[in-house]
Amino acid sequence: MLAMLALTFATPGGPVASGSALPWLLFGLGGLAVAATWAVQRHQRRELHAALDRFVVRHEGWHRQAWPCGLPTEQLVDRFAATPRGDRRHGVEAAVGGPLELPINGVPVTCQVACYVWFHERRQTSRSNGRSTRRYQRRTDLVVMCQLPVHTHRSVSIQPESILGRVGLTRTDEQLESEAFNRRFKVEGGDRTLVVTLLDAGLQELLSTAYGGRGLEFSDDLLVLSGEPTHRDRSLAGVAETYPAIVQDLRRLLERIPPAFWRALGFTRDGDEEPPPPVAARPSATAPTTPSAATTPSAPATPPPHPTPSPRPDLPPPGPEDS
């Protein structure tokens, strides 16, 4: 409509001379582009909301969330590498979650799980002809977060290694036995023993082959897996296409975490703990007390038999000279 109005003003018989028709034409085209962009974004938002509703129906007890796992934004910002503050605005988008049964140390445990998008804005400054121009670039991270039944007490972070780190120039993190794993991931943790217990050979292989370019973090009772999955559910729309895949990746990751890691955090299965030593029952006040072998005084050892004295020889009776 705006373009048609601009063309009307641009006609020779119009109210505006032909020399001033070009600004009106540009204004009309710009308005048309803005309207088209707004319509497309509105349609995409509607599709995303509908897809999120279809996704939560698949999991009993799930719903749309403003606070993932009940945590407000200020408790998430800068807590993980996947939730930075940025330079201006930040927050949570498209969050859904609820209870989900997951394997923890081989035991099915119901945990709170949330899938969401974390966004933040980074400031970019450019200079041209002695003038600086500032603009903000919007960045997003895909996150699935799980509330564990135990606390790590010390944070553990496993992130993709930088380009310089891959060639061994800037490696200041924890180094493990696998050089291939060290080239692909940057590992940081407050407790090296706990880090080594977590990253056994099986988990290192899984992360290297199936979780390349993704981050894994532990903080208190939270586990965060960030990054894009390798497949999508095309029956959904928008970012909701990735939610089934990141939930599957979370489940597979928890299945491969070694039992020694859970035991180090105090989470054990039935039968893992050794039974306590038996406690002797206290004797009843009315029951006769039977002395035990430990309290009964032992009989004195039988002394060795003394040698029998030999009989003395009979002496004759004293004579008169002896009196």
Image (spheres, rainbow, N blue to C red):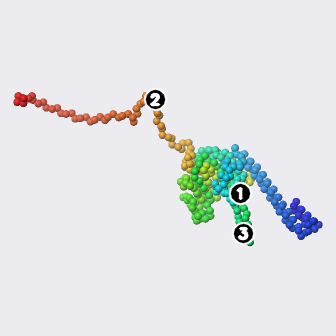
What residue lies at 40% left-to-right and 32% top-to-bottom?
291
Left or right, 105 with reference to 144: left
Disc on the earlier residue, 1 or 3: 1
| Disc 2: which residue | 285
The answer to whether the residues at label 3 and label 2 have Cβ atoms under 8 Å apart is no
Q: Secondary structure at mark 3?
A: strand
In this view, which residue lies farthest toward the left? Answer: 321
Quick check: marks 1 and 2 in contact, CB under 8 Å? no
Amino acid tagged 3: Arg
How far separated are the C-alphas under marks 1 and 2? 74 Å
Disc with the residue nearer the chain's start (1 vs 2): 1
Q: Is residue 260 above or below residue 121?
A: above
Image quarter hosting the N terminus: bottom right
Total numbered circles: 3
For label 1, the residue is 89
Residue 88 position, x and y percent, is 70, 59
Q: Label 3 belongs to which residue?
A: 127
Residue 286 at what x, y percent from top left?
A: 46, 27
Q: Position of residue 162 (x, y in %)?
A: 62, 62
